[in-house]
Each structure stands twice: as structure tokens, then as C-alpha cells.
Image: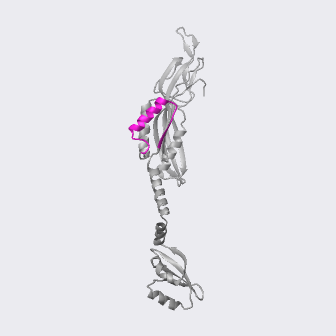
């Protein structure tokens, strides 16, 4: 049944005579089957449908490639619909229809637009690969140079999204006489202390709860004095996040992009992302699992011992 056939049902007391008549009309019969005493079913090629009309036989069903082609060509609207749908899917999967930038600074938004333009990203352009998005992310990150706290770029359908949060700077801390401690483990990157006794140095590793700035100094005559403490201690800190998704839901590339986006969203508002590293990307227990490590530069100074 490679091309197309009609299944007929006919009632006849003399099937032999009927078959001889078919032979004279050059009708080609396939799979003749007896249903009951005088009822038979068989297939005839679709292209012989016109020749078979003289016998007033009932068509039970039609099968084969030729049948479906006939249906499509007889209903032009179906062809147009199928072609339109296919073209729509093709276009939606390959092109960017809109670029949406979300942020809280007109100047930074303009900077984003300039970087995107330099990378040939406009409505109507081809969608970018994950590698290309990563390169654009790096360009944006380099262009901002500390002007933002959070940055993310991703594609959904025909829309490319760029989201950022403008840096508002460190909050002014009231002068008080409490010691300053490390809020988490890290390596000291810079020290900006206007008041207090600094007890750490740049490139020193500190643990959460370690004393960074003391409120006590010793005078030349050996007397201890309590002074106010104020300042920032910037440090390289490390954080690891893991995301997972059912391996059957997305292919390898789509799953990686989705998991990376969800992991980046967990970072929230930070001072700066210094490095981003893929630790592993594997299938574990039928799930795609992505493990990422981030090196951040953030203020770890707190007034209360943690």
C-alpha cells in the first residue's frame, strides 16, 4: 500500500463474474476478502476511482500517500494553512522580534542599547546562540564597570531580554563603637576604613566571624581607648549553586540556558560578579544537573559578630 488505495465493499452472488468484469475494465484488485456469504471487500488503486464508478460500489475508507495528497490539493486552504504554520514556526524559532531592556537608569539603558547595537542585535536579526549571549553578557559587564549590581541576558521565544539593577552604592553607616566582623568567608580585596583599628590586610583569607576592624587602640602610654569604627572591607567570596530539570523536557542546549538563567537569578543584588565557572553539567537520575561557582566581590563588614 505504497501510494493510495480505496477500500470497497460489494454484495454479489457471483463474485467470479464481477472479477472478470473488473479484468475487462483493467481494474486491479488487491486483498479480496469475503465478509459473509455474498459480501466482499477489496482494495482498488485511487487513480482507478473513475473507472470503478460504473459499479456503484461503496468506499469504506481510503489510505496511502496519494490519498492525502489528493485531500490537500482539493482543499487549498489546508495547504495555505500548513505552509503558513510551518513558516511561522520557522521564523519564530530563528529571529528576534523584540528587544526588551529592564533597568532603573536611563543612561545605563542607553549604554545597553549601544552595546547590543555593536553586537548586531536588533529586532529582525537572527537569534543568538548561548555562546554569543555569553559574549554579549561579558561585553555589557565590561561596559558597566561597577555601575550595576545585577545583570542578566536571555531569550524567550522571539524576545531578547536584558535586565539589570543600577548600583545604589553602599549605605551610610552611623558611627558607633562596635567592632567590625566578617559576615562570611573570603579573601580581602580592598580596605576602605575611615575610623577604627584595622587588624587584617589585603589578600588575607578570613573566616566568617573573624575580627576585621577593632574599636580598641593602645596609646603610646599603654592605655587602651575605645574609638568609633566605620568603613568597608571588600572581599572575594565564593558561592556554588546547583539547578536541575527533567532530562526529557528540553534538549541539552535549551536545558543549559534555562538552568543558567535560574541560577543567576538566585544571586540577587551583589556588589560585583568577578568570575563565573561551570563546575559540572551532567545527567543524574534522568535529570540534567548544572553546578555553577561564582566569585563575587562584596562588602563583608558587619557590626555584629556572626
Please determine whether, in this image, residue 67 is positioned above or below residue 162.
Answer: below
**In which image quadrant can residue 36 be found?**
bottom right
Residue extent of the magenta highlight: 98-124
State yes or no: residue 112 in magenta. yes
Q: Residue furthest front?
A: 54
Coordinates of residue 165 in the picture (x, y in percent): 52, 32
- Asked if residue 193 can be seen in this view, the reply is yes
Q: Position of residue 85 (x, y in %)?
A: 48, 57
Q: Nearer the viewer, residue 154 or 134?
A: 154
- Left or right of residue 31: residue 132: left
Residue drawn at the location 45% of the way across and 34% of the way down? 112
Tell me residue 246's x, y (percent). Answer: 55, 52
Residue located 46% across and 81% down the image: 51
Does residue 121 belong to the magenta stretch?
A: yes
Residue drawn at x 49%, y 62% as measured from the top left: 77
Viewer-proximal residue among 176 and 77:
77
In the foreground, 40 or 190:
40
Task: Answer yes or no: is residue 147 visible.
Answer: no
Horizontally, is 139 left or right of 209 in the view?
A: left
Q: How many circles with numbers are drawn on the protein?
A: 0
The image shows residue 265, relative to residue 21, as above or below, that is above
Q: What residue sits 46% from the left and 29% below the top?
A: 107
- The vertical placement of 245 against 234, above or below, is below
Q: To which quarter of the image does residue 221 belong?
A: top right
Amino acid at each position: 500500500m505504497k501510494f493510495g488505495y480505496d477500500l470497497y465493499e460489494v454484495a454479489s452472488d457471483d463474485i467470479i463474474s464481477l472479477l472478470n468484469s473488473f479484468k475487462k475494465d483493467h481494474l486491479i484488485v488487491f486483498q479480496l476478502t469475503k465478509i459473509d456469504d455474498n459480501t466482499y471487500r477489496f482494495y482498488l488503486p485511487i487513480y482507478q476511482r473513475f473507472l470503478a464508478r460504473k459499479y456503484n460500489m461503496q468506499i469504506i475508507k481510503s489510505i496511502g500517500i496519494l490519498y492525502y495528497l489528493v485531500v490537500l490539493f482539493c482543499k487549498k486552504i489546508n495547504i495555505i494553512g500548513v505552509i503558513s504554520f510551518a513558516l511561522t514556526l520557522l521564523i519564530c524559532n530563528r529571529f528576534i522580534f523584540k528587544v526588551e531592556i529592564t533597568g532603573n537608569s536611563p543612561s545605563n539603558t542607553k549604554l545597553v542599547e549601544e552595546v547590543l547595537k555593536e553586537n548586531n542585535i536588533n529586532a529582525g536579526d537572527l537569534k543568538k546562540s548561548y555562546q554569543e549571549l555569553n559574549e554579549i553578557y561579558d561585553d555589557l559587564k565590561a561596559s558597566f564597570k561597577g555601575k550595576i549590581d545585577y545583570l542578566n541576558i536571555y531569550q524567550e521565544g522571539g524576545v531578547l531580554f536584558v535586565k539589570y539593577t543600577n548600583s545604589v552604592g553602599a549605605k551610610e553607616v552611623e558611627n558607633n563603637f562596635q567592632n567590625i566582623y566578617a559576615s562570611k568567608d573570603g579573601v580581602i580585596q580592598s580596605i576602605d576604613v575611615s575610623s577604627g583599628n584595622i587588624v587584617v590586610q589585603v589578600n588575607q583569607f578570613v573566616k566568617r566571624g573573624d575580627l576585621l576592624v577593632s574599636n580598641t587602640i593602645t596609646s603610646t602610654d599603654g592605655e587602651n581607648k575605645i574609638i568609633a569604627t566605620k568603613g568597608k572591607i571588600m572581599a572575594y567570596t565564593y558561592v556554588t549553586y546547583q539547578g536541575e530539570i527533567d532530562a526529557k523536557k528540553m534538549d541539552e542546549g535549551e536545558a543549559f540556558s534555562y538552568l543558567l538563567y535560574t541560577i543567576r537569578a538566585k544571586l540577587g543584588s551583589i556588589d560585583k560578579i568577578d568570575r563565573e565557572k561551570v563546575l559540572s553539567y551532567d545527567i543524574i537520575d534522568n535529570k540534567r544537573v548544572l553546578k555553577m561557582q561564582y566569585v563575587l566581590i562584596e562588602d563583608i563588614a558587619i557590626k555584629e559578630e556572626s
